[in-house]
């Protein structure tokens, strides 16, 4: 995406409220990524890492961890918006997070995002809620829907 918004002020973010951004480029989920995530999180449930057992399981293949899907959000967000116009932005957390459909290994996933709320937290700073919708190619339901919450501070504003 070459024409992504480049907000530099809280007012710029307010102006983006309600506008759907995206989708991002497709990202193919590989078994190596799932295995690495399992090692990092120590979550080696068979549905994620045992390809033989998972082939006979409910989905016919291994599936990505829901939290692995969610963790793609920051990188996808960078594809959709440029925040380099701010002194800093911080991940403040998440509101509601749901995984309506599993993400099979080998699937392609992408994200759309909508800024749904901008709340000033001080001069030149605000808390931003962005609804992220992760979709997989060929799957009707989203594989993840999350309310990402960030804190943004304009250049020249205090922390």
Image (spheres, grey):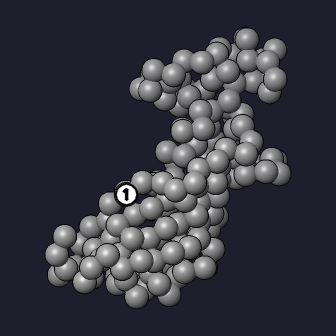
Mark 1 surroundings within 10 Å by alpha-carbon count, few (fewer than 14), some (14 through 19), many (20 or more): some
> From where the camera sits, is residue 30 visible?
no
**Quadrant of the drawing holding the N terminus:** bottom right
Image quadrant in which you'd find residue 7: bottom left
- Above-or-below relation of 68 to 90: above
Q: In this rendering, would 55 be left or right of 10?
A: right
Point 72% across, 37% down: residue = 102
| Number of marks in the rendered image | 1
Front-most of 98 and 75? Answer: 98
- Above-or-below relation of 150 to 41: below
Image quadrant in which you'd find residue 63: top right
Q: In this rendering, would 75 be left or right of 151?
A: right
Q: In this rendering, would 32 be left or right of 156?
A: right
Provide residue 134's location: percent of width, then percent of height: 65, 53
Point 42% across, 54% down: residue = 93
**Quadrant of the drawing holding the C terminus:** bottom left
> From where the camera sits, is residue 64 visible?
yes
Provide residue 64's location: percent of width, then percent of height: 62, 33
Question: Circle 1 is placed at which residue position?
Answer: 92
Point 55% across, 59% down: residue = 147
Point 17% across, 81% down: residue = 156
Q: Residue furthest top?
A: 52
- Above-or-below relation of 24 to 2: above
Which secondary structure, mark 1? Answer: strand
Front-most of 24 and 37? Answer: 37
Provide residue 130's location: percent of width, then percent of height: 52, 66
Provide residue 110's location: percent of width, then percent of height: 64, 54
């Amino acid at each position: 995406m070459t024409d992504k918004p480049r907000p530099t002020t809280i007012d710029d973010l307010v102006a983006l409220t309600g506008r759907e951004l995206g989708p991002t480029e497709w990202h193919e989920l590989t078994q190596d990524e799932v295995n690495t995530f399992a090692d990092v999180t120590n979550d080696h449930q068979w549905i994620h890492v045992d390809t033989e057992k998972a082939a006979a399981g409910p989905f016919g293949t291994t599936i990505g961890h829901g939290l692995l899907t969610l963790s793609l959000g920051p990188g996808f967000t960078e594809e959709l918006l440029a925040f380099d116009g701010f002194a800093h932005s911080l991940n403040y957390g998440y509101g509601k997070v749901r995984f309506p459909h599993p993400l099979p290994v080998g699937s392609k996933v992408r994200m759309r995002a909508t800024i749904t709320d901008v709340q000033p937290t001080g001069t030149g700073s605000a808390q931003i809620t962005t609804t992220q919708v992760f979709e997989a190619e060929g799957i009707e339901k989203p594989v993840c829907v999350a309310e990402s919450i960030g804190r943004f501070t304009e250049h020249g504003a205090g922390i």
